Image: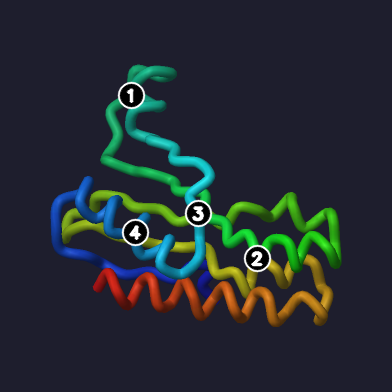
Amino acid sequence: MSYTLRTQVDGKFDDVVEKTIDALEDEGFGVLCDIDVQETLQKKLDEDFRQYRILGACNPQLAHQGLEHDLELGTLLPCNVVVYDDDDGVVVTAVDPQRLIGIADDDELDPIGDDAYERFERVLELLS
């Protein structure tokens, strides 16, 4: 079973990153961090790597609901969305929030994971 949702997108890498951020915002997510893995590996290890960005996405309303129920849930936040160059185009992949929240093993949190999953699905559908 996969732990991500994934789509392939035609377009230039930077344009896809911006479209992804916009689509996340349309679904109520803010991007709390933006890690440029290619740049980091070049600086820290002097290694070449494909274009690869990790976007830490958080929906404040869903996060608040989860944290009100379980303060330890913050260890699973934010949800990562990754954009990277692939041989056939640009890939956008997101952590499956249902699987991620399943780690907490608390059925009361399931609706939050379901809501986030549906939002990520819409983001990826918009991009494809």
Depth check, mark 1 against mark 2: the one in front is: 2
Residue 35 percent coordinates (x, y): 44, 37
Q: In terms of image quadrants, where is residue 92?
A: bottom left
Q: Would you name the residue on which mark 2 appears?
A: 61
Above or below residue 99? Residue 83 is above
Kind of residue at badge 2: Gln
Residue at point 55%, 69% (across, down): 96
Residue receiving disc 4: 22
Amino acid on which the number 3 mark rests in the picture: Gly
Between label 1 and label 3, give the one nearer the viewer.
3
Question: 10 Å neighbourhood of mark 4: few (<14), some, or many (≥20)?
Answer: some
Mark 4 or 2, nearer chain start: 4
The answer to whether residue 109 is left or right of residue 115 is right
Q: Quick one: SS at disc 2?
A: helix
User: How many angstroms separate mark 1 from mark 3 (CA)?
Assistant: 30 Å
Q: Within 10 angstroms of label 2, few (less than 14), some, or many (20 or more) residues?
A: few
| Mark closer to the chain start, 1 or 2 | 1
Give how far apart the Cα atoms at labels 2 and 3 are: 11 Å
Sequence order check, earlier mark of 4 and 1: 4
Question: SS class of the residue under badge 4?
Answer: helix
Residue 6 picture location, percent across and down: 38, 69
Q: Position of residue 120 (x, y in %)?
A: 46, 71
Q: Amino acid at mark 4?
A: Asp
Q: Secondary structure at mark 3?
A: strand
User: In the rendered image, which residue does mark 1 sit on?
Assistant: 47
Q: CA distance from mark 1 to mark 2?
A: 39 Å
